[in-house]
Image (tube, grey):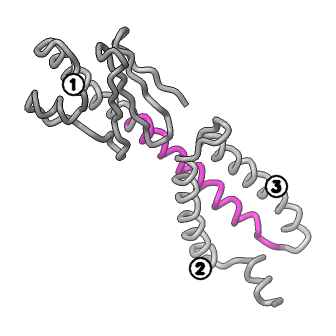
Amino acid sequence: MKHFINILLRPSKEVLTVYGLFSLIFLIGYVWLFSFVWEYYSSVTYYVLGLLVVLLIGVLATEEIDKRYQGQLKLYFRISFLQLLLIWIIANPIRSWQIESSLQKAKRITNSLSLYKKRFGVYPFTLAELEERLKEDLPTRSNLGTQYWYKLTENNQEYELKFLSYYGNTAYYNPYQDKWLITD
């Protein structure tokens, strides 16, 4: 047991490498998992910031333990802290690209809906009908796989179009203003 504690307190490069791989896999899974959790109106940002704070506290707390036992526990926390920061730095541009690109795809749908209304005087009941009657290949999913939802309003004179982005934002199209409203 003493040998195991010694390995943890004073890790070799090999131990840190193995830890780093497991930490990276866990943190990517953490960010991915909480990208889809929208409890209490919290976005993944709050979960990541919360974990960054916990890891930073871990770095500070292990400073004292390392001094007392001549250990290097802080290295584990530093590795995970830097990995999570890097994952978040990479994830944000992907998030922005996904939303913008999904909006561009959705614009193809709204343009086709306008064309359909001009030709036939009404909106289609489904996106499949729109595709079939206009002989167009319209997107059914956003870039990272979320579906576009389409619904006619009660009087069949207007429609609702929306999609859920990877990070849980819901984008609603307002046909009156020709604008998208994106909510958390």
Residue nearer the viewer, 85 or 97: 97
Residue nearer the viewer, 117 or 90: 117
Query: Residue drawn at (87%, 67%), measured in percent from left and top?
Result: 65
Q: Amino acid at mark 1?
A: Pro
Location of residue 42 with respect to 172 vertically, above or below: below
- Tell me which numbered mark, 1 or 3, is placed earlier along the sequence: 3
Q: Position of residue 83 (x, y in %)?
A: 58, 56
Q: For this view, does 128 lie left or right of residue 16?
A: left
Q: Amino acid at mark 3?
A: Leu
Say which element carries label 1: loop
Mark number displayed over residue 60: 3
Location of residue 27 with respect to 153 vertically, above or below: below
Residue topped by disc 1: 124
Q: For this view, does 142 lie left or right of residue 25?
A: left
Q: Position of residue 94 (x, y in %)?
A: 42, 42
Dominant SS type (magenta)? helix
Q: Amino acid at mark 2?
A: Glu
Q: Is residue 180 magenta?
A: no
Residue topped by disc 2: 14
